[in-house]
Image: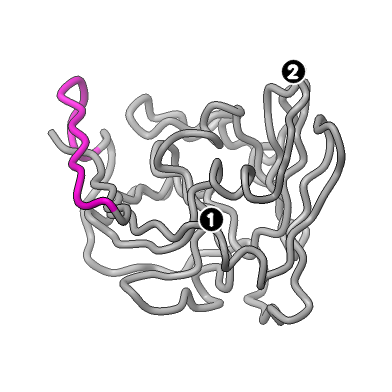
Amino acid sequence: MGVFQRRPSGGPEFVSRPDRPRVPPGQSVTTSFPTLTAEQVLSVDVNNFTFRFWGEVREPTEMTWQQLMTVKHTILTADFHCVTGWSMLETEWGGALVRDVLEAAHVELSTSARFVMAHCTTEFTTNLPLEALLADDTMLVWEWNRLPLTSEHGGPLRLLVPSLYAWKDAKWVSGFEFLTEDRPGFWESRGYHMHGDPWKEERYG
């Protein structure tokens, strides 16, 4: 069954995963997009926005919002799975692949980098293995259904990791800290799973 469809400038590409069901176990499909957040919804001024890269990198660096907008634009249609038990199928996002952002920012990772902590404008953090961050469907997104991503859903900038539960899709994301060892983020330190694979039901630690 198909899991996601990536539509870069070159045209449509449907990626199939026959080894697992379309909807992960314990999930119910919805057509709505519930607003769930651990923190108060905030407004971020893109004119004063900076996205930072630090930790296990050759040299820490950052990008302004204007620089981020020059990175190759990608449209991705992805299934979206919340740990609370609902899934949206074929949601459409616009933004840039994380690996394209890293290339554009000239981020050179240390050979010891194995994990990443996504940091946000708020105090929220979430951890990922490096391979999940660099996957071909992991993005920094600023559009949903061809419209600017609203602040309620993490706008102006949100991380999108379709292979994991959506709490890993950090809202109001503002930087990546590259790590040699895994470290729990906000929800992980409160009992959520360190990885979060929906098909393995990695909901809680």
Q: Where is residue 69 shown, x and y percent of the image?
A: 57, 68
Q: Where is residue 45 shown, x and y percent of the image?
A: 71, 82
Q: Amino acid at mark 1?
A: Leu
Q: Is residue 17 magenta?
A: yes
Residue 111, numbered circle: 2
Q: Amino acid at mark 2?
A: Thr
Q: Residue at x 21, y 52 (%)?
A: 11
Circle 2 — which element?
A: loop
Relative horizontal placement of residue 85, taking residue 48 as reference (left or right): left
- Please tell me whether residue 89 is drawn above or below residue 168 in the rendered image: below
- Please tell me whether residue 45 is drawn above or below residue 72 in the rendered image: below
Q: Assess disc 1: are there few (<14), some (14-19) or many (≥20) residues with their C-alpha within 10 Å of its C-alpha.
A: many
Q: Which residues are magenta?
A: 10-23
Q: Quick one: label 1 or label 2, which is nearer the N terminus?
A: 2
Q: Where is residue 24 shown, x and y percent of the image?
A: 27, 36
Q: Nearer the viewer, residue 108 or 127?
A: 108
Q: Is residue 83 magenta?
A: no
Q: Where is residue 196 shown, x and y percent of the image?
A: 49, 33
- Please tell me whether residue 19 is drawn above or below residue 173 in the rendered image: above
User: Label 1, on which residue?
Assistant: 140
Q: Nearer the viewer, residue 97 or 24?
A: 97
Q: Nearer the viewer, residue 163 or 110?
A: 110
